[in-house]
Image (tube, coloured by chain):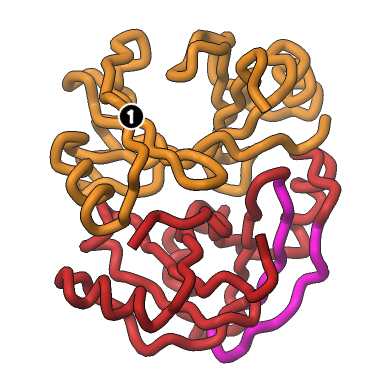
Chain colours: A red, B orange
Amino acid sequence: MKLGRLNHVGVATPSIADAIPYWRDMMGATAIGEPFDLPAQGVKVCFIDTPNTQIELIEPYDASSPIAAFIAKNPAGGQHHVCYEVPDIYEAKAWFEAKGAKVLGEPRIGAHGTPIFFVHPRDMGGVLTEFMETPKGDH
Amino acid sequence: MKLGRLNHVGVATPSIADAIPYWRDMMGATAIGEPFDLPAQGVKVCFIDTPNTQIELIEPYDASSPIAAFIAKNPAGGQHHVCYEVPDIYEAKAWFEAKGAKVLGEPRIGAHGTPIFFVHPRDMGGVLTEFMETPKGDH
C-alpha cells in the first residue's frame, strides 16, 4: 500500500456553531460546509476546506457519542484523528490486519459517503487514524 | 487573512528511528526525509510526504524539550500540532494579536527554514497551531 492523500484532520469541538465564527473570522476560512448529522457515527460534522486538504469539525451527537469522552477530557476541543485516502477499503483493511494492526470494526459509510474504518492509535504511533476510500471521480 | 495550505501535521514520537519503519512498512510512505536536529526548538525532526501535505515527526531533543511533557503524558506519541502557511509572518502575527489570540513568542526560524510562530491552543479550539511563512518559490 502507498500512503495516500491526507483527506482531513479531525478536530473535536464542543460546538460546531461556536467554532464556525472562529474558522471564518480568525482563521480566514472561506469554504465552510453546511454542518450535518451523522447519527450512525454519533457525531455532527462540518467540513472546512484549506487549499490542499480539509478540517473535519466533529461534535458529539448525543451523550453516547464516541467522542463524548474526548470532549469531557478536552472541554475546549482538540485534534482527534487524521484521515488518509485509500483506493480500496477492503484491501486496506486486509493490509493493516495482516500487519497486526487493530482495525476498529467493519468498514462503514463515513462523512464523505464512502466506506471508512479507524485503526487503533496504539498501532499508529498514538494517532487515531481513519482510512477512507477515495470518492470516485475525485482527484 | 485567508486560510492557507496545511503545511504539515506535527506528530510527537518518543523515537523517530523507531517511527520510520512504521511509516515505511505499515503506512506505505515513499518519501521520508532525513531526520535532523533543531536544538533551538528542542526537537529532532523528520518530514514525511503525503501526496498533498506532510507529517512532521518530532522527538524531544533532550530532557528540557518543550515536547518532553507531551511525551511523558503520551508515551506512544500522538498528534501534537497543525501548521498552516501564511504569506507574511509579521502580518500574520499582527492579525492574531489584533484578534486577542496569544502568540507564543517572537517569530523564529522553523524546520522548513522560514519564520514561524505558534498560537496558544486555548485560542485555537484546543489545537496547538503553528503558522509558517511559505517558502519563497514554493507552490
Q: State the residue at coordinates (65%, 13%).
A: B136
Q: Tally the marks.
A: 1
Camera-side residue: B106 or A71? Answer: B106
Camera-side residue: B131 or B50? Answer: B50
Reply yes or no: does residue B97 show up in magenta: no
Q: Which residues are magenta?
A: A32-50
Q: State the residue at coordinates (66%, 16%).
A: B137
Relative to residue B66, is residue B53 drawn left or right? right
Camera-side residue: B106 or A33? Answer: A33
Relative to residue B62, is residue B38 drawn left or right? right
- Above or below residue A74? Residue B67 is above
Please state, as top left, top right, bottom left or bottom right, where the N terminus of chain B lies in the image. top right
Q: State the residue at coordinates (39%, 73%).
A: A118
Badge 1 crowding class, 10 Å Cα cut-off, few under 14, some 14 to 19, many 20 or more, is few
Question: Where's residue B55, x and y in %?
Answer: 42, 40
Q: Amino acid at mark 1?
A: Gly
Camera-side residue: B81 or A21? Answer: B81
- Above or below residue A19? Residue B96 is above
Q: Chain of mark 1?
A: B
Question: Where's residue A74, x and y in %?
Answer: 47, 56
Q: State the residue at coordinates (37%, 62%).
A: A128
Reply yes or no: does residue A39 show up in magenta: yes
Please state, as top left, top right, bottom left or bottom right, where the C terminus of chain B lies in the image. top right
Question: Where's residue A113, x and y in %?
Answer: 64, 81
- Above or below residue B85? Residue A72 is below
Q: Is residue A82 visible?
A: yes
Q: Which residue is mark 1?
A: B33
Q: Is residue B128 visible?
A: no
For the residue labelled by badge 1, is the local secondary structure a helix, a strand or a loop? loop
Quadrant location of residue B115?
A: top right
